Amino acid sequence: MNNLNIALCCKRCGNILIQQPDGFVCNYCMQTYPIEDSIVLMEEKNKEIDLRIGDNLLDLYKLRDERKYYNSYIQSNVEYLARLHSVNFPNFHTKLLSPYISNSTIVDLGCGQLPYINSFPDTINTYYGLDLSKESLVIAQQNFKRKFRLVLVHHGIKDTPFHDGSVDIVLSSEVLEHLDDPFGYLREINRILKDGGHLSLSTPCVSIYFYPANLFSVLVKPFIWYKEVNAHRYWKEALKWHPALQPSILRRWLVKTGFSVERHESRLWYYGSSPKLVWRFFSFLEKMGVDSSYKMFGKCLELTDRLLASNLPVIKWCGIRQFVLVKKVSNIKGR
Ligand SMILES: [Zn+2]
């Protein structure tokens, strides 16, 4: 399977792009897409932006490798463990996709800083990362250490520059919950995937609203809580609070857009959420001078992840992020 050149195509005429030292050039209409800081610039100006970009960019690699949260050094071991857990959780995509990776073309839609890129093996053919944040792509490029071909493209997730049925794998990590048209997004993924190709997708799981700390809202503001739990019915409004989907709704959406579900699991994610209570508890112990508090916290995280991976009914959906691996089984174009 030699498909080095077949994936990226011209936005203007749809023909194949040829890589040159300073950019990609269309071999039909001669349109040039320049490369700046190793990033291919393909996003047209003044186009409607469909993905909300964070104002403050947190460098996930600095967090992991230098214990830096924004610009301050993380003193506390408990805090470092909690934040590290939140950076490393997307590595689950690598695990889900491992049987299909060899010699594949992967497209990562809304790839951000690619905090999981170095967890992929060198057997990948080409990895395309698309994102609207050029700053994030620069960080991704600086930290890339593998030997496979990585092409970073400044481009959103609508009308992506790939031919129909040209991609083996699509990866979507924490993107769906930011989009005004999630169905259009899943349809676009269906369009670019080959028949039998795989999508690994993660998005918040509704379980977060059933955590003890959040159950209080049922009493205080029951209607808002109802809307949070049924975000799929109030999607446009829910975008403001970063919607978390019911697992069954996510599966229904994927089946409707031409996929069959192969695996569906949940995992924890500590950063900025109610499980922070556990983090606070161990932080308190640490402040009180209990030396082993961060070790106990680490064990606690490990145990929770094991419980979630055990497939025990109900428990397996307690994670606040859900990961789903699906296969394209039908072509929905034109439906
Ligand atoms: Zn062209």
Image: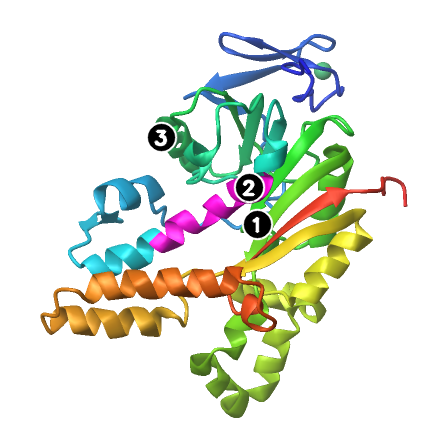
Q: Amino acid at mark 3?
A: Asn
Q: Is residue 19 magenta?
A: no
- Which span of residues is magenta-colored? 85-97
Q: Tell me the SS state at disc 2.
A: loop
Residue furthest out toward the left: 289
Q: Is residue 94 magenta?
A: yes
Q: Tell me the SS state at disc 3.
A: helix
Query: Is 213 placed above or below 39 here?
Result: below
Residue to which mark 3 is pinned: 143
Q: On the rendering, which quadrant does ligand 1 occupy?
A: top right
- Using residue 141 as the reference point, say whether residue 32 is left or right of it: right
Query: Percent position (x, y) of residue 159?
Result: 71, 35
Q: Amino acid at mark 2?
A: Gly
Residue to which mark 2 is pinned: 110
Residue to which mark 1 is pinned: 175
User: Between disc 1 and disc 2, whose residue precedes?
Assistant: 2
User: Between disc 1 and disc 3, whose residue precedes?
Assistant: 3
- How would you rate the neighbour count of disc 2 (Cα within 10 Å): few for under 14, some for 14-19, many for 20 or more? many
- Calculate the distance from the C-alpha at mark 1 to the C-alpha at mark 2: 6 Å
- Whether tag 1 and tag 2 are in contact, CB under 8 A, the answer is yes
User: Between disc 2 and disc 3, whose residue precedes?
Assistant: 2
Applied colour scheme: rainbow
